[in-house]
Image (cartoon, grey):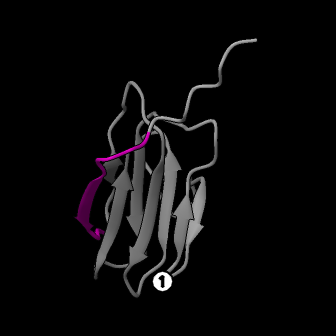
Amino acid sequence: MPIPQPNSAITTANLIPVPSSATNVTLFPQAGSGSARVVWNDSTATLYLKFGAAASTTSFTVKLAPGAYYEFPQPLYVGQVDGIWDSANGFARLTSW
């Protein structure tokens, strides 16, 4: 019977603040791999996330209320993620590893 190997520990995370925008903005570019992605809507406006290009208030995947936090489910979607807010104030606080 093979000996189980310990899980690899993650020692580096990418933290990126993205200013809010009332027009489409790319939050995560397409990536070849990754373990996790999270978003905190640090804004008083609603953030609309789209798994893919060209987010709008009518074309989105996830709607994040002000102050909401979202963890991408597994298996991790590593394609482009765009976003748009109801109004431009605050940031999206992105973390990936």
Name, please, the residue furthest toward the top: 1
Q: Which residues are magenta?
A: 9-21
Q: Residues within 10 Å of mark 1 (few under 14, many from 20)?
A: some
Q: Residue 39's x, y, as percent?
A: 44, 63
Q: Residue furthest bottom?
A: 44
Q: Nearer the viewer, residue 41 or 8?
A: 8
**Residue 50 location (% of width, % of height):** 51, 50
Q: Which residue does the numbered mark 1 point to in the structure image?
A: 66
Name the element at disc 1: loop
Q: In which quadrant of the rendered image does the N terminus lie?
A: top right
- The correct choice, above or below, for 85 with respect to 54 in the image is below
In percent of the image, x 58 and y 67: which residue is there? 63
Q: Residue at x 28, y 82 (%)?
A: 89
Mark 1: amino acid:
Pro
Depth order, front residue of 97/10: 10
* Image coords of residue 78 (percent x, y): 46, 34
Residue 24 against residue 92 in the figure, above or below: above
Location of residue 97 in the rendering, given as x and y in whole percent from the top left corner: 38, 45
Is-magenta flag for residue 94?
no
